[in-house]
Image (cartoon, helix red, strand yellow):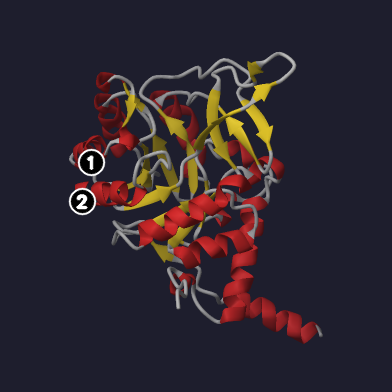
Amino acid sequence: MQSSSVDLEYTMNKVDLSVNLGRGLVLPNPVMTASGTFGYGEEVSGYFDISRLGAVIVKGISAEPRQGNPPPRIVETPSGMLNSIGLQNVGMEAFIADKMPFLRNAGTRVIVNVLGSSMEEYVRVCERLDGVDGISALEINISCPNVKEGGVQFGMKEDLAAGLVSRLRGVTGRHLMVKLSPNCGNISRMALAVEQAGADSVSLINTITGMEIDVRTRRPVLGSIVGGLSGPAVRPVALRMVHEVFRSVRIPVVGIGGIMEGEHAIKFIIAGASAVQIGTATFTDPMAPLSVLDSLKGYLCREGIAAKELIGTLRLS
């Protein structure tokens, strides 16, 4: 019995978990954290060694600090939660000075989520981060409002998204991962548009817009009225969109949406995701990313395959 346990552990340690997302972004395993749910990494490092993760994606960074939306900013919903944080963050200069020293020595790949209210702000942040050591990739959040276009989100119009990515491709040589909104008209066409503009990978999905009402006061629960729905409730939607986008583009797809345990991550990879991000699950269990990783490793061991061999193996007939 002891010998079998030792053999199993040895076999699991031999499983090839690495995935290549292109432009030099090779992850030791497919499990990442989702932006906005893991702080800047240091806050969660007391729970486990974050170097065990494939990558850490930090809270979205803007050119200047943002205070975010008025409270209440989070409310639990059936099988998920609504949040309306309002992109609160320390700003790029404080991030570089105060957050990067820890991340640079954390032993993990660091992906910085970039946000902006105009193309000029995105460009400014990406240009500044381009010369900062210790950053492996930039995840471009195109769900931010473009003030010059009357408040429309970059992620809602294919021409705006493509124009933004093309501009950013010209100012940075880093891997560009573009985070797509499920609220756009056709997410496959949006993915194809950013691929053609120079994106190296796409991550999806961002949250679905929703709201909640307090029947006693007849007022919205969130201070900003609406927020982003995440958690298990959105998983089937996210899974379908990952499958559709995988069949539409050549660049790697990163799956996000209600991944609470290892089996959920496996489903996303089968659907076409090269890697996954864990978000809402960390609110109920900070150790969730490691649980997902261990479960995925066990599955690959039993199947006798590497992580990259599982990608897009959905059987349709």
At 41% from the left edge and 49% from the top edge, which residue is drawn?
203
Mark 1 and mark 2 lie on one chain; the one further toward the N terminus is: 1
Identify which residue is drawn at 31% across, 33% down: 154
Q: Quadrant of the N terminus?
A: bottom right
Residue contact between numbered discs 1 and 2, judged by CB atoms under 8 Å: yes
Residue 278 pos. (x, y %): 56, 49
Q: Is residue 5 left or right of residue 102?
A: right
The quarter of the rendered structure image containing the C terminus is bottom left
Q: Return the mark for residue 182.
A: none
Q: Residue furthest right?
A: 1
Residue 26 visible in image? no
Decide: is 45 above or below 29: above
Q: What residue is rendered at 67% in x and 40% in y?
A: 283
Q: Amino acid at mark 1?
A: Ala
Q: Secondary structure at mark 1?
A: helix
Q: Amino acid at mark 2?
A: Gln
Secondary structure at numbered mark 2: helix
Mark 2 crowdedness (10 Å alpha carbons): few <14, some 14-19, many ≥20: some
Residue named by callout 2 = 196
Q: Position of residue 29 (x, y in %)?
A: 50, 62
Which residue is drawn at the image coordinates 63% and 72% (left, top)? Answer: 298
Q: Which residue is mark 1?
A: 162
**Placement of 219 over or under 246, stated as above or below:** above
Work out whether residue 167 or residue 7 is closer to the camera in this orientation and state it: 167
Residue 187 in the image: x percent, y percent? 36, 48
* Residue 221 seen in the figure: yes
| Camera-nearest residue between 133 and 226 | 226
Quarter occupied by residue 46: top right
Position of residue 315 measured from the top left corner of the image (x, y, whole percent): 47, 75
Q: CA distance from mark 1 to mark 2?
A: 8 Å
Q: How many marks?
A: 2
